[in-house]
Amino acid sequence: MVDAMEGTKGEKTGITRRRFTLGMLIASGAGALGSLFALLKVLVPEKKAGYVTTIQPGDRLVYAKGGNMGTPLRASSFNVGDAVLAFPAGKSSNPANLVQVIRLKETQFGPPTHLDLTDQGFVAYSAICTHLGCTVSWVENQQAHAASFTECFCHNTIFDPARGAKVLSGPAPLPLAQIGIKVAEEGTLVFTSQFTGPIGPQVS
């Protein structure tokens, strides 16, 4: 009788250990999968995730970086061929608000640029590449301003700011979205519209 009871206890102990071991394996596997999904979420950007602008018509443009960071952009500080990165005043904490402001000759603009969103040669586009969201840069050709262009150095997409920031080469699927700006009476630059298209990465 005692041997039978001890045998039963042994079987129960064996089952309990097996269940415990199985539970630990399942928990470990779930934890590993969770870590993998978290890593993938970081490495693979979500389509359009988080790129919601808060720019409103009337917002004043300020320098996004450099010694003048936070101070208003003034038309008198720009020569033809100049370009800077800018934010709307008081809204620099939102990276979706970052724009590239360029001054070209008015005769350089061609379709599909929205001419009604330009003023005195000033044009502005989202500074966020539509490929994977890197910040674009201005590449100036001082000998021939018409040959200057905007480039994303992450994957070498080239945009044409004189023609609606259309893609000239590279993997970006869409042009940079244009946004309206004008020279205000006091010589500062202000926004006049919302973006004409989606901003941020458009790759799924």
Image (cartoon, rainbow, N blue to C red):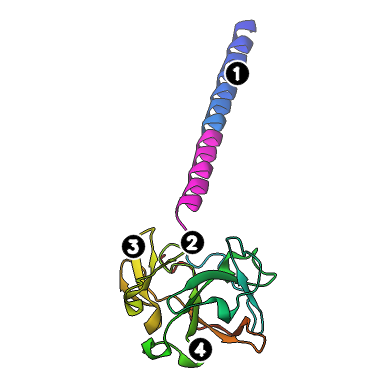
Q: What kind of residue is marked 1? A: Thr
Question: Which residue is the extreme one toward the right?
Answer: 90
Q: What kind of residue is marked 3? A: Asn
Left-right relation of 70 to 152: right
Q: What kind of residue is marked 4? A: Gln
Image quarter where the C terminus lies is bottom left
Q: SS for tag 3?
A: loop
Residue at x 45% of width, y 89% of height = 114
Residue 185 shows in the view? yes
Which is closer to the viewer, label 3 or label 4? 4
Which is closer to the viewer, label 4 or label 1? 4
Residue 98 shows in the view? no
> Which residue has dot 2 on it?
46
Q: SS for tag 2?
A: loop
Q: What kind of residue is marked 2? A: Glu
Q: Which mark is residue 120?
A: 4
> Which residue has dot 3 on it?
156
CA distance for labels 3 and 4: 29 Å
Q: Which residues are magenta?
A: 26-46
- Circle nearer the N terminus (2, 4): 2
> Which residue has dot 1 on it?
13
